[in-house]
Amino acid sequence: MSCLVGPTTTALAANPAPAQQVQIVAEKMCCQGCARKVTAQLYAARGVQSVSVDMPTHTLTVTLPQPSAVALGSLWDAAEKGDGGPTTMVIGDATFSFSRAESSANENDPSRAAAAPMTIAIDNLHCKGCAQKIAAQLYATKGVNKVSVDMQQGLLHVEAGPDSRLSPWALVDAVFKAGERPLSVTGKQGELSIAWATPAAPKTDDPNTQANLSQPNAQGIQR
């Protein structure tokens, strides 16, 4: 999980972020021409240092400085723009897949889907304190207007402002910054799923069953 969270400003100044490798399976990449097209789009993404291609497995290996989930989303978008048909993306022990909703792909006004409520499933969301940490990071994400949580189901529901555009990758980024592991983000844009190769660390505190986390203020979430 930590491999996806960007370094602090202090750490960045002292030690440049180490390069990370991201593997993208591009199902539609069937020839050298396709590979060149997808590779060109990936090189246009910020921070990309190198791209290698394994045609037999339809896999691209992208090297770039320690990426945020938002940066991973840019790689996914680049692979789509290059008509690569990405199906999975792997970094560390996390495997990402993003299935766009049919209505989102054909929506005349993309902001309508982006402003719709989204639901985040969390791996082992066991207490209100964990939910508060995540909600604080979500509220720090531009466009987030309201966060509510269902502890019993391990879900956070995120509402955007009327003129806001929310990306599921940005919500995943917020969860990583809170030190937790997201399993999925669903909404009208589609479903972003994350499968983990290793189990979540055990937690022992007793969970609260439900909580409603309002906009942070003097009486709100402690940061």
Image (cartoon, rainbow, N blue to C red):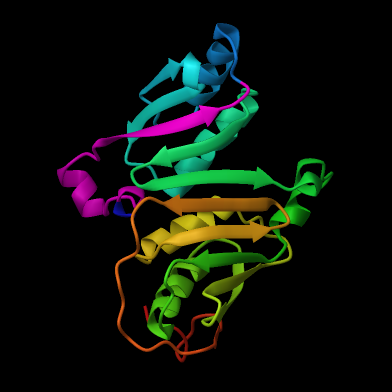
Quarter of the figure that contains the N terminus:
bottom left
Give the quarter of the figure containing the C terminus.
bottom left
Q: Which residues are magenta?
A: 3-28
Residue 109 or residue 178, whichever sits in front: 178
220 vs 131: above or below? below
Relative side of 2 to 142, left or right: left
Residue 46 visible? The answer is no
In this view of the protein, which residue sits in the foreground, 183 or 211? 183
The x and y percentages for residue 148 are: 58, 79
Spot occupied by residue 32 in the image (x, y as percentages of width and height): 55, 7
Taking the spot 58% from the left edge, 54% from the top edge, the residue there is: 168
Q: Is residue 14 magenta?
A: yes
Residue 99 location in percent, x, y? 65, 45
Q: Residue furthest left?
A: 14
Q: Count every numbered label the image shows and give the total.
A: 0
Residue, x 54% and y 88% (percent of image)? 210
Residue for point 60% across, 24% down: 84
Q: Quadrant of residue 50?
A: top left
Q: Is residue 134 left or right of residue 12?
A: right
Q: Nearer the viewer, residue 59 or 159?
A: 59
Give above or below for 136 relative to 108.
Answer: below
Give the residue at the far top of this rendering.
32
Q: Is residue 105 left or right of residue 159?
A: right
Residue 138 seen in render: yes
To which quarter of the image does residue 87 belong?
top right
211, above or below 102, in the image: below
**In the image, is residue 1 part of the stretch drawn in magenta?**
no
The residue positioned 64% from the left and 27% from the top of the image is: 81
